[in-house]
Each structure stands twice: as C-alpha cells, then as structure tokens.
Image (cartoon, rainbow, N blue to C red):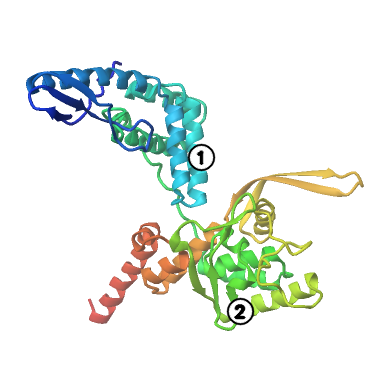
Amino acid sequence: MAKERITIDGEGSIIEVERGKTYRIRHRLPPAVPGGKRKWSKMRTVHGNKAKARIELEAYRTELEDVLNNEHATLKVGAYAREFHQRRLDMGTLSSLSLERDEIEIARIEEYFGGVPVQDLDAATINRVYAKMRKSGTSASALYKTHQKLSQVMKQAVKEEIILRNPCDLIDDVKRPEAAERRSLSAEQAVQLALDLKECERSGRIVAVWLALATGVRRGEALGLVWGNVDLVRKRIRIEKQLDSKGVRRDPKSHKSKRNLAIDDGTIAFLTEWKIMQSDLFYQGGDVPDDAPVCSNDTDGAFISPAAFDKWRRAWFVDHGLGTFEKVEAWHDRNGVKRYRRSGYKGYNLHELRHTQATLLIGRGADIKTVQNRLGHSSASLTMNIYAHAIEQNDREAADTIGSVLGL
C-alpha cells in the first residue's frame, strides 16, 4: 500500500539580509536519527525581493521533503526497533528486568518485521505476520506482548515524523489474554505446609519456601536475600535485591518492590535456627557474613540456582501433596542405582504462596494498603484488581454481618 508523503511542518524561516535584494531561507527538519533533536536545514540564499524568497522557500520545502522521504524509505523496522531499544538502555531509567523482557520482544520484531521498511508497514502486513506467528505456535500472550512493543516503537516513529500514523492502531484482534485464575492455598493447606516445613531438615531451599509462605516474597527476592538485610532483633527483613534466572543479584521488579517486611516470631525462630546451622556448616561456628545468602545451597553456602531450586521445589511439592507428575520413568545409573526421571508437573508453584499470603491477609481484614506494601505492588489499585475475589468475599461477609446485627 502506498504511503502518504512525509511533510515538513512549519512555515520555515526567511531572514532578511538586504531589504528588497537578498534573503536567506531554511526549514526545520525532523530528527536525523531516532530520538535526536530537530535541526534547521542549511541556509539557502535568494537574490530578489521578499515575494521571490517566499516562492523559493516553498520550492526548498518540496526539495527537502523528497530527500527526507527517500532517506526514510531505506529505514527498516528491525533497525529502528533496535535503535529504539538501545536508546532506552542508554537512558538507564528502566530496570534490568524490564529491559531483558524488552529484548525478547525486540528480537521477535527483528525476526518477523526486520526487513520491512518503516514507511511500508501497514495493517495488512502486520496481519499477515501475526497469522504466520499464530500458525507457528506463538502463544496469545507472546503475540500480545509483541504487538504492544511494535506499537510502542511505531508510536515513536510518528513522534519523530518518520511516518504519519501508527499502523498498529488499525489492528483490533490482538487482545490481552484472559489472566489465568490465581490460585492460593486454603487456610488448612497453608497450616499443613507450615507444619511440614518445620518438620523437615533445615536447608536453604526449605527456608526459601518458608519465606514465600510467611512473607509473600517472590522467588528471586527469597533467593537473593542476604543476612545483612535480616534484622532478627527488630523482627524485619529488607527486600533490596532479587536473584534473576541467570543467578545474578540485581534490583527488584520496581521501586515499590524495595520494602521492609515485618516478620513474625515463628519466622524469627525459624531463621535463627537456620543461621546457627549455617555457621556450623560453612563458617566453622563463626559469624555468618552480612553478604552471605540466607537461602544458601547445601555445598558451599553460595546462592542457589533458580533453576535448581525450581526442580527441587516441584519434587518437594509433589511429596507433600501440592502437585503431581504426569510421567515417572525409572532408570539405573552407571553404578546400578535405581533413579527416577519425573516430568509433566501439575500443581501449585511458589508464586501461589504469595497469593496465599495476600488472600489470607485480606480474608482476615487487612487493609489493601498494607497488603500492597507487603507484596511490593506499584499501586493499591493493582492489588485490588489482582485480589478482587478475596475483597468480594470480604464484602459478602460484611453484608451478612451487618444483616445479623440489624436483624434483617
């Protein structure tokens, strides 16, 4: 589909050098590179009166627009998206987690739209590509994220006057997928889990599950916690970092995710016992350093790999009635020892212990602001949207209570 020509906004400038005899003209151009500043074109001298200068100014506009359109015609979507991403990196205002997720979407845009000129990207092209992505097995969630990122990139192209309108605005069949139902343990299941954890031999993995249940921290926040951020006297922990999927300790999901969390006496006792054990296991009975991980591994006291933790956690949950494996294969190692290979896990995950904390707190009358702060959500509205089911249940109980009080 043919694209409308890009035009230069504004009237341009006429500078009088000698009244009625000599003038200089110029136009303000769009940025030469994405994110750049608008600059003036080169001055052009016109000999004659001001009426002639106005005529030459319009002719100069057409000439510049021809050059501008020819230059933009060579700009590809992939290259522009990569430049857009690099600028966000250079700004340093986004978390490493956000930029890492952006990288996935930018790479997908490069793969599917890379060679398409920015000016030629239209709704028909986008729909064809999306159909191809669906056919290749791209999930609805992945497609939605790609569309959101492509729309963001093309919106910037509009701002920088590379294109006149965002073609993504014409796509109306890519919707945010329905959120999966957020499960949580019942109060009885949560109590049983706490009992099982207490009865298990202490380890960094067991401590990570305890923290998720008792405080609602995310997996990365539990695995990235160090003893310097645990105050057993004031009964609180400080969430400042998280351990990412690559085993790198970095800033958490958002600014609000950095928070202080009060901990109960049971958690104090649990952590105190574990710290003494760590001292004996890894530090010859001496002090555990402040930079030592709370949820350490079993070999040298270092941080636990998130992948290794997830593998262990799935098996542990199955053993304690919180999940199942669809497939279990027996095999023998080189020493003839019988081993089991298990796959197809179905059941609760660690993040659902976070939901359990929130649901139980709301069910016991905790205010939304408190729950928001404990979970590290960016806003109370986000907390309300996520846990609307628990709030609705509280509202039902409140209605029944007032009805019984008033005898209705």
Q: Which residue is mark 1?
A: 103
Type of amino acid at the residue the image marks with label 1: Glu
Dot 1 lies on which element? helix
For label 2, the crowd category at 10 Å Cα-Cα, with few meaning under 14, some 14 to 19 and many 20 or more, is: some
Image point (20%, 30%), residue name:
9
Q: Is residue 64 visible?
A: yes
Q: Quadrant of the N terminus?
A: top left
Q: As drawn, is 32 to the left or to the right of 352?
A: left
Q: Is residue 141 visible?
A: no
For label 1, the crowd category at 10 Å Cα-Cα, with few meaning under 14, some 14 to 19 and many 20 or more, is: some
Q: Position of residue 16 (x, y in %)?
A: 13, 29
Image point (38%, 32%), residue name:
33
- C-alpha gap between disc 2 and disc 1: 40 Å
Q: Toward which corner of the image does residue 157 lie, by quadrant?
A: top left
Type of amino acid at the residue the image marks with label 2: Ile
Q: Position of residue 362 (x, y in %)?
A: 41, 69
Whether 78 is drawn above or below 369: the answer is above
Q: Which residue is mark 2?
A: 268
Q: Pick out the residue farthest to the bottom.
A: 233
